[in-house]
Amino acid sequence: MPETFHPNYEEAKVPPYNLPDPLRMEDGREVKVAAMWHEDRRCEILRLFEEHVYGRTPRDSLTLQFETREVEDGALDGLAIRKQISIRLGDQANGRRLNLLVYLPRTSQPAPVFLGLNFHGNHTIHPDPAIFITAHWVSNIGALGVMDHCGSPGANPRSSGAKRPAPRTSLSIFSLKTNIWSC
């Protein structure tokens, strides 16, 4: 009988491991020229990320539906425009969603955008009470106040992710986007 899979959400419990050399092909050949990287090794690495980390991108076209849930033109003391957008993947009303939080600098000039994945809820990047608290499953992390895999006003403190990019300091040059994946 197969062993039951038990996921590990604690970094301290990860056993020692060695990452593969990014400049060595799976068959052992060394990547020596840029063409070999672009044509061969890069494809191997992307396949490994599909297989072991992120999963595969659907081969069929995917219907995306966007709902702008909130726009605030004077966010961060007037420095930014904050947008909170729900992106539904597929046609089903109860399908998977991405909750996208966007901070744009208040300028007429285009600005580069950084997109960050967030696994604790968008509300953990800044203490602004207008940022929606996730209703989706999140990892239990005592330091973030997350218990029972739930983001809630009482359990998940705002802006508890001190290692995350601070919107206020980034906005002079860049836009910032963060999202949380829902199940």
Image (cartoon, helix red, strand yellow):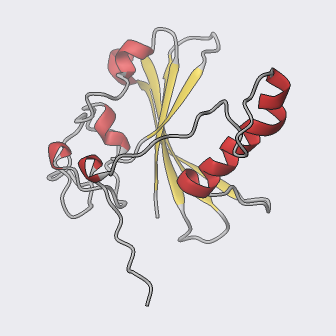
182 vs 145: above or below: below
Q: Is residue 33 left or right of residue 91?
A: right
- The residue shown at (24%, 47%) is 12
12 vs 89: above or below: above
Residue 166 horizontal/vertical position (percent):
35, 22
25 vs 146: above or below: above
Out of 178 and 131, give the one closest to the viewer: 178
- The residue shown at (43%, 15%) is 170
Q: Is residue 112 left or right of residue 35?
A: left
Out of 143 and 97, give the one closest to the viewer: 143
Residue 19 horizontal/vertical position (percent):
50, 40
Q: Is residue 8 left or right of residue 37?
A: left
Is residue 87 shown to the viewer in this render?
A: no
- The residue shown at (44%, 20%) is 80
The quadrant in which residue 9 appears is bottom left
- The residue shown at (32%, 60%) is 8
Is residue 86 shown to the viewer in this render?
A: yes
Residue 55 horizontal/vertical position (percent):
60, 57
